Amino acid sequence: MAASRTRKLFCVFLHFTLLSFSFVTCSTIEEMNSVELKSAMQKHLRMVVYFYTDDCTECERQLSELEKIATALDDSVLEGMPVVKVKSVQTAAKYGVSKFPSLVYFRSSYPMLYGGDAVMAEDVFPWLERNVEVVTRELTDEDFEHLTQAATGATTGDWFVSL
């Protein structure tokens, strides 16, 4: 009788232990659709978005590296910056993503596509830290004169114009 009770207690203990491990290993990367992504970009100044597809074997392999990055962000100056994943080719195309997997760093809703071959924590993390601020500026017909000449006092300058 004591052996039976011990066995039951052991089974209950094992069940709860395995259950707790399943919670620990759950993905920390939130899945978002395009509406949720747009809302999150309005809410957060900076965020990292991982674009992927179902039929991409490399996407799954790199997702574990992305989880390392998300964990490392919590212990850095970028603490609290969300890392999310999006499985929408249409949403990806809106931000210039044409291959999968792709990593995009949004700063004030401005996208910056990661140019590395693979999402590796040791490469991506320094890239995120180096590019905290947006260093490009969008010029329109209304503000071109003011931003290019009046602000600097110069009448000419070197400018890169992308059409």
Image (cartoon, rainbow, N blue to C red):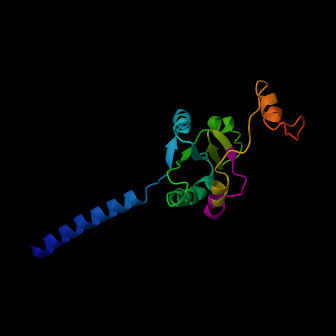
Picture layout, residue 2 above or below residue 33: below
Camera-nearest residue between 79 and 102: 79
Picture layout, residue 69 above or below residue 49: below
Camera-nearest residue between 30 and 38: 38
- Which quadrant does the N terminus fall into? bottom left
Judged left or right of residue 94, residue 63 is left
Span of residues in magenta: 112-125
Q: Quadrant of residue 141?
A: top right
Can residue 104 be seen here? yes
Is 160 magenta? The answer is no
Q: Quadrant of residue 16?
A: bottom left
| Residue in view at x 33 percent, y 61 percent | 20
Q: Residue furthest top?
A: 142
Picture layout, residue 136 above or below residue 62: above
Camera-nearest residue between 25 and 36: 36
Residue 154 x %, y %: 87, 37
Q: Residue furthest bottom?
A: 3
Judged left or right of residue 49, residue 113 is right
- Which quadrant does the C terminus fall into? top right
Residue 57 x %, y %: 62, 54
Residue 17 x %, y %: 31, 65
Can residue 163 be seen here? no
| Residue in view at x 61 percent, y 53 percent | 59
Camera-nearest residue between 108 and 32: 108
Residue 46 x %, y %: 58, 45
Is 113 magenta? The answer is yes
| Residue in view at x 51 percent, y 54 percent | 79
Picture layout, residue 5 above or below residue 29: below
